[in-house]
Amino acid sequence: MAGGIKDKVAILGMGCTKFNEHWEKNSSDLILEAFQECLADAGINKGDIEAAWVGNHLDEVNIGKGGYYVSGVLHLPMIGVTRVDNFCASGTEAFRNACYAVASGAYDVALSVGIEKLKDTGYGGLPDSPVFGQFVSLIGPNGTAPGYFAQLATAYAAKYGISMDKIKDAITHISWKSHQNGAMNPRAHLRKPVSKEQIKGSPYVAYPLGLFDCCGVSDGASMAIITTPEIAARLKPDQDIIKVKSLQISVSSGEEAMYDNWDGAGVVTTQVASRKAYEEAEIDNPREQIDLMEVHDCFSITEMVTMEDLHISPPGKAPDDILEGFYDLDGQVPCQVDGGLKCFGHPIGASGLRMIYEVYNQLLGRWSEERLVKDAEIGLTHNLGGIPNQNVCSVAIFGK
């Protein structure tokens, strides 16, 4: 009988570039930069890596359709390298494959890579072109990502009888909080704190989402080396071992879009994946047991509904928790402690592993005092791809 992967795999090392407009660098440069940090952190030789998975979405622009590009850049020793694509959750998908490979006993050491040069598409947002054709086929020729996610706000307001003014206050606080956190993070793309007045006064992109409620466009790479807890403990006897407590994925079957039982006020795949993740990790009260989170805040309203979809805030109470500082850096469950997609932007293949990178280093207590979550033991990442009613969601939980 299937028993999940709880405590069967550990993160041996991680690396992450600064997310930015890397006009002077290509995909190879970013992959190498993240790999050097990752390999040094793991404390192993390149020849110890037995297999690799690469998360990347825009293959025509970046690395091609197979895994040979990354194998060539890193001069890997003729091992299996597989490219995976699962929309904006591609980074976590690469991590999931590497984790399952180690948990199965097929390999002792595996590499997961996330890479995207989104600025090279030449678009200010997700490109409306054949390169991004799958997404365009989902939302239609006149749809936009901000437009679809903005509808979560009006649906939420209708479901719970909450004014749009209060929702606007809540999502303003989300954006403000993330920019406060990102200002302290040298790897973030956008590092200037902004006031709530600036956020509220910014031009609308899709009501009620203003400019600061939408994540930016950037380039970046991130990666992780996965092994067994036993090997990690032997190689790093004086360091806490960060284990994967659970890793679950849920993909829309189309029922949200085809039937009328979806209320439009949340994301069903997040609700499903998080329930399965908590069960696998043996967490029965996530509001009390999760110490920090990195979630897919492509838009501030996405983060708001995610707080309930992850079963942290009670139904209809996410705005109250947000406005009371529950998810602030000094709150009970800090969220987007590195600045999130709001400050990093969203190079599609890299975002999921970037979230894991932050949680991993937070649990190891590596960051400066001003941005460290004190005494953190359990962290969660949430990586979403697609639109609210047709998407893929990965939820992962990590612990010492």
Image (cartoon, rainbow, N blue to C red):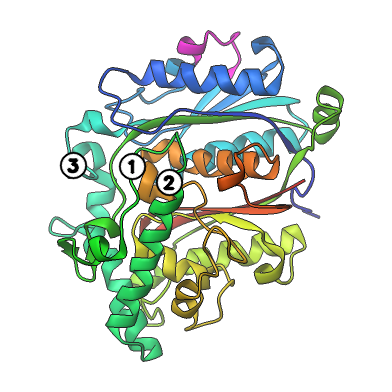
Determine contact: label 1, label 2, CB under 8 Å: yes
Q: Residues within 10 Å of mark 3 (few under 14, many from 20)?
A: few
Q: What's the CA distance linking mark 3 and mark 1? A: 15 Å
Quarter containing the N terminus: bottom right
Coordinates of residue 299 in the picture (x, y in percent):
33, 59
Q: Residues within 10 Å of mark 1 (few under 14, many from 20)?
A: many
Q: Is residue 389 visible?
A: no
Q: Residue 284 colored magenta? A: no
The magenta span reads: 71-80
Coordinates of residue 96 in the picture (x, y in percent):
60, 41
Q: At label 2, which amino acid type do we have?
A: Gly
Q: Earlier in the sequence, mark 2 or mark 3?
A: 3
333 vs 371: above or below: below
115 displayed left or right of 71: left
Task: Tell us which disc is closer to us: 2 or 3.
Answer: 2
**Location of mark 2 (residue):** 182
